[in-house]
Amino acid sequence: MSPDTKELVAKALDLGAFAAGVVSVEDMLETSSSQYVREKALADLDLGSVGPDKKAAPHWRNKALSLLILAVAHPKDEPQLDYWEEGVRGGTRGNKILITINQKLGQWLMGFGINSFDVPYYPEKGGLYLKDAAVLAGLGVIGLNNLLLIPGLGAAHRLRALALKSEFVTSPATDYNPCPGCPAPCLKACPEKAFTRKAGDSSHSGPQSGYKRELCHLQMQKNIKKNSGKGKAIRFCRRCEEACPEAKV
Ligand code: SF4
Ligand code: SF4
């Protein structure tokens, strides 16, 4: 018998994911981020990528019915998981772990006759907005630091998606929300002052609401410039992520 969502999520956790959940492609296409991508035709989507510039079609939109969203822990004391390194599959060791889990899940699903495929990380390379997808898949909530917060991990995680060609029931939503009542050290940690929102702000969703993405990108470009060069790994800023006390691992 084919696995259901609960069994699929349990298998993902068994293979090393810290959290996982399912969202339907139909629901994902309704998000403001998906609509934004359609309107902009992927023209303005430079997210600080260090990979090749080539744009790719988002096949998950018309070739899949559901999406499994996976998170692996990215502890503060293992910064190397996030370094961009030449020759590492997926660009970083964290990404490589996620790709390997997806590969094993794909083989397991194939045993039930279910086809699936790994979804690239960047939207302009055929991917999707993983934070939005993760919220819809019940993994967590978007925090004041504009990052996805997952119970037990806060923002200290990395995400990836597996597109499923069979329909799985969407995972239940979570009511986890640690930001109200938090003094928000994340907002003060930013070297670029990218946050204009304050502790206790309740309406912080949306890219233009109290967060200047372009200032964060400026910091990314500085990191790329500072750390690139032969044999050097690129280390991105994680200050707003690391300042969040929700990370317990
Ligand atoms: S990643 Fe760094 S630069 Fe970007 S918003 Fe967070 S603290 Fe600011
Ligand atoms: S530091 Fe506090 S306000 Fe900021 S994301 Fe974490 S829980 Fe939310």
Image (tube, rainbow, N blue to C red):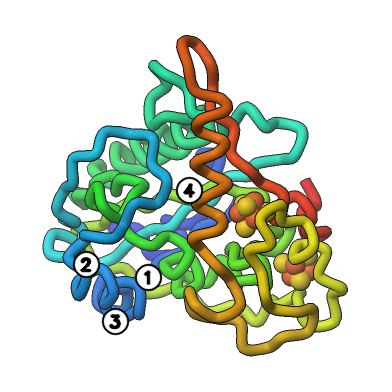
Above or below residue 173? Residue 76 is above
Q: Secondary structure at mark 2?
A: loop
* Residue at mark 4: C-beta within 8 A of ligand 2: no
Distance of mark 4 from mark 2, alpha carbons? Answer: 18 Å
Which disc is residue 30 wearing? 3
CA neighbours of label 1 inside 10 A, class few (<14), some (14 to 19), many (20+): many
Query: Which residue shows up at 39% across the image and 16% down it?
Result: 87
- Marking on residue 65: 2
Q: Above or below — where is 153 with respect to 131?
A: above
| 10 Å crowding of disc 3: few (<14), some (14-19), many (20+) | few
Quadrant that contains the N terminus: bottom left
Secondary-structure class at tag 1: strand
How far is the residue under mark 1 from the one under mark 3? 12 Å
Q: Is mark 2 within 8 Å of ligand 2?
A: no
Helix, strand or loop at disc 3? loop
Residue type of the residue flagged with mark 1: Val
Instruction: Name the residue type under label 2.
Output: Leu
Among the two numbered marks 4 and 2 on one chain, the one whose residue lies closer to the N terminus: 4
Residue 167 in picture, x, y percent from top left? 25, 68
Are the residues flagged by discs 1 and 4 in contact, CB closer than 8 Å? Answer: no
Find the distance from the CA under tag 1 to the CA under tag 4. 15 Å
State whether residue 110 is above or below residue 37: above
| Residue behind mark 4 | 12
Q: CA distance from mark 2 to mark 3?
A: 14 Å
Disc 1 target residue: 23
